[in-house]
Image (cartoon, rainbow, N blue to C red):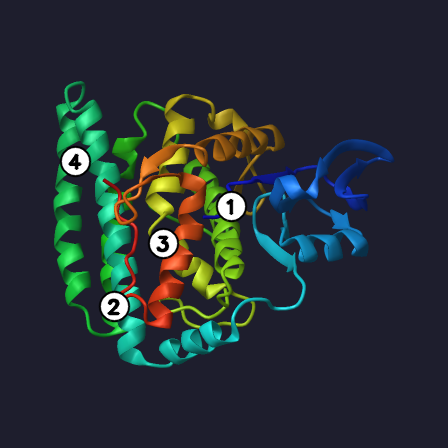
């Protein structure tokens, strides 16, 4: 099992990262801000304009299998640095063959979508159970949406084509996000459905930022076990898009990102004052708020739960790596189907 290590998040504009012995050194305005041994890390994520890293550090990260990626201050992925492609070539060839076979592709995508909808339903039911006594009307909204998602799970399991499966997923997302305001309590933050590129309200800005963090973790998980992160099943090939990472993250969106957003909002750690609106109407997190979100993200990844298939306790942060390995076992023929993660 992979040891659960830490991710270094750099949020300083114009930060410079360099290799210092066996450590990474973060410098800003000619001053050393931090030194961290590379063996303590499994990822480095840079948020900021003009953030850069030395060639020697990039080489050291590639050799140590530390994912190094660069993002805008608002979480949009820009680029990643990696060395030679590693992993078993036979596994990758099996992945490419499966991606070219409609039946194999639909079988994997069907389990991913079904699990995603089921995990969305789990979030709604948990909220209805926790807050139903305080607000019966709110609980009714959540239960009605959960009932609609139950039907979409059955539709997803019956789908035989990718286009129909994507239609079911979009339909389920519409019901889920229509009930999302009932999850926000009395935060005062507006939310009128999911929107992005750019996000138009604070809740969508927070969700988009968290989804980008999750994409980084899932991409690292796919690459770490020898899979090609760009060759997906539900998300088809597109230059520059980590389609397999997007596939893996679907079942984790409700449990990782959505639950994290709800916790931060309902605890009032993130409020309306933590966002800024640009001239084009785009809404983004301010720098201090991004640090709050990143701290919570790292703490949440340490949360333990029981894995339903492995029947052992694992941390949330390990789940993408475990699921990537289960997918690899399926592609090799060791498992009859990909067992997507279902929350209990």
4 or 2: mark nearer the eye: 2
Mark 2 vs 1, N-terminal side: 1
**Can residue 188 be spotted in the picture?**
no
Determine which of the numbered discs, if any, sits on residue 250 in the image: 3
Q: Mark 3 touching mark 2, by CB under 8 A?
A: no
Spatial separation of the CA atoms under disc 3 and disc 2: 21 Å
* Left or right placement of residue 316 versus residue 46 in this view: left
Residue in view at x 40 percent, y 51 percent: 322
* Left or right placement of residue 77 versus residue 264 in this view: right
Q: Is residue 42 above or below residue 183?
A: below
Secondary structure, mark 4, is helix
Image-quadrant location for residue 192 = top left
> Farthest residue toward the right?
30
**Picture coordinates of residue 208 (x, y %)?**
47, 46
Q: Which residue is mark 4?
A: 141
Spatial separation of the CA atoms under disc 4 and disc 2: 38 Å
Secondary structure, mark 3, is helix
Q: Which residue is mark 2?
A: 336
> Farthest residue toward the top?
134
Mark 4 vs 3, N-terminal side: 4
4 or 1: mark nearer the eye: 1
Spatial separation of the CA atoms under disc 4 and disc 1: 30 Å
Q: Residues within 10 Å of mark 2 (few under 14, many from 20)?
A: few
**Picture coordinates of residue 260 (x, y %)?**
41, 34
Mark 3 vs 1, N-terminal side: 1
Q: Residues within 10 Å of mark 4 (few under 14, many from 20)?
A: some
Determine which of the numbered discs, if any, sits on residue 213 in the image: 1
In the depicted view, which residue is nearer to us: 299 or 190? Answer: 299
Q: Mark 4 touching mark 3, by CB under 8 A?
A: no
């Amino acid at each position: 099992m992979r040891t659960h290590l830490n991710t270094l998040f750099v949020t300083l504009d114009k930060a410079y990262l360099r290799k210092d012995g066996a450590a990474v050194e973060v410098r800003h305005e000619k001053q050393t801000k931090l030194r961290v041994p590379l063996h303590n890390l499994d990822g480095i994520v840079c948020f900021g304009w003009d953030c850069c890293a030395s060639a020697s550090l990039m080489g050291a990260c590639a050799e140590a299998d530390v994912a190094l990626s660069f993002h805008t201050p608002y979480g949009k992925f820009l680029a990643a640095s990696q060395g030679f492609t590693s992993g078993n070539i036979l596994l990758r060839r099996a992945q490419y063959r499966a991606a070219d076979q409609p039946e194999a592709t639909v079988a994997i995508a069907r389990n991913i979508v079904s699990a995603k909808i089921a995990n969305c339903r789990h979030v709604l039911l948990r909220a209805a159970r926790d807050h139903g006594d305080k607000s019966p009307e709110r609980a009714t909204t959540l239960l009605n949406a959960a009932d609609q998602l139950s039907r979409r799970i059955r539709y997803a399991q019956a789908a035989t084509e990718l286009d129909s499966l994507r239609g079911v997923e979009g339909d389920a997302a519409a019901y889920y996000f229509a009930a999302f305001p009932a999850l926000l309590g009395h935060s005062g933050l507006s939310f009128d459905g999911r929107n992005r590129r750019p996000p138009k309200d604070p809740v969508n800005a927070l969700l988009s930022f968290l989804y980008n963090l999750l994409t980084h973790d899932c991409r690292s998980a796919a690459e770490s076990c020898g899979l090609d992160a760009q060759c997906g099943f539900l998300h088809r090939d597109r230059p520059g898009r980590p389609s397999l990472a997007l596939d893996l993250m679907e079942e984790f969106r409700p449990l990782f990102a959505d639950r994290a957003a709800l916790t931060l909002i309902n605890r009032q750690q993130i409020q309306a004052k933590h966002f800024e609106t640009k001239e084009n109407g785009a809404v983004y997190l301010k720098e201090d708020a991004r640090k709050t979100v990143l701290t919570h993200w790292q703490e949440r990844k340490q949360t333990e739960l029981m894995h339903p298939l492995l029947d052992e306790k694992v941390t949330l942060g390990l789940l993408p790596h475990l699921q990537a390995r289960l997918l690899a076992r399926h592609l090799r023929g060791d498992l009859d189907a990909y067992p997507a993660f279902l929350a209990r």
